[in-house]
């Protein structure tokens, strides 16, 4: 599905407020309600709109410590890579996991309440995964920007 200017306006608006009522959305993008609703449905059916979620403030739910973790595996064969990915997918502290090219194999974004909780997570879960050779932890000092909205 090729996106036109109206589709992009719809997506921009919904990225900033996914709970926007259809009439409000239609007015914001310059359509009447029925055509706007049809377009949103098409965007959903095409998989462009994947899901609607509530974004939580980490500090309000005691998960205010973001941590970036670089993981190097013993081997990069299919079995080791797939095993690590499957194990990490089960860990709720891992918010993102990316298979990387370069000097390390995976980059994780982990959230915990504090350093003690991260240490427990690393020692009890992350470093016990078969195939993990090296873990490098990086703790950000200050968040400069975070967004969930794609530039359309």
Image: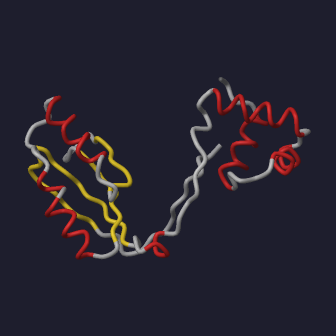
Q: Quadrant of the C terminus?
A: top right
Q: Name the residue located 81 percent from the left edge and 45 percent from the top edge.
A: 22
Residue sitting at x 35%, y 64%:
111
What is the x, y in percent for residue 62? 41, 74
Decide if residue 111 is on the left or right side of residue 126.
right
* On screen, residue 38 above or below 102: above
In screen coordinates, is 140 left or right of 54?
left
Left or right, residue 4 beside residue 72: right
Picture quadrant where residue 39 is located: top right
Q: Position of residue 2 (x, y in %)?
A: 67, 25
Give the colour scheme shown.
secondary structure
Quarter of the image with the N terminus in it: top right
Residue 43 picture location, percent across and down: 68, 32
Q: Is residue 78 above or below residue 144?
A: above
Q: Position of residue 72 (x, y in %)?
A: 15, 48
Residue in view at x 20 percent, y 42 percent:
84
Of all residues shown, which one is farthest toward the right? 32
Image quadrant in which you'd find residue 142: bottom left
């Amino acid at each position: 599905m090729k996106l036109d200017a109206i589709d992009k306006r719809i997506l921009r608006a919904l990225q900033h407020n996914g709970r926007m009522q259809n009439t409000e959305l239609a007015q914001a993008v310059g359509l009447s309600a029925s055509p706007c609703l049809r377009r949103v449905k098409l965007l959903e059916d095409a998989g462009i709109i994947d899901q609607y979620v509530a974004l939580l403030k980490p500090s309000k739910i005691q998960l205010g410590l973001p941590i970036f973790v670089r993981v190097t595996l013993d081997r990069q064969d299919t079995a080791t890579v797939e095993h690590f990915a499957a194990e990490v997918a089960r860990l709720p502290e891992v918010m993102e996991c990316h298979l990387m090219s370069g000097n390390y194999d995976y980059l994780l974004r982990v959230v915990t309440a504090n350093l003690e909780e991260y240490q427990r997570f690393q020692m009890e879960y992350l470093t016990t995964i078969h195939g993990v050779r090296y873990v490098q932890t990086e703790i950000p000092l200050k968040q400069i920007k975070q967004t969930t909205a794609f530039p359309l």
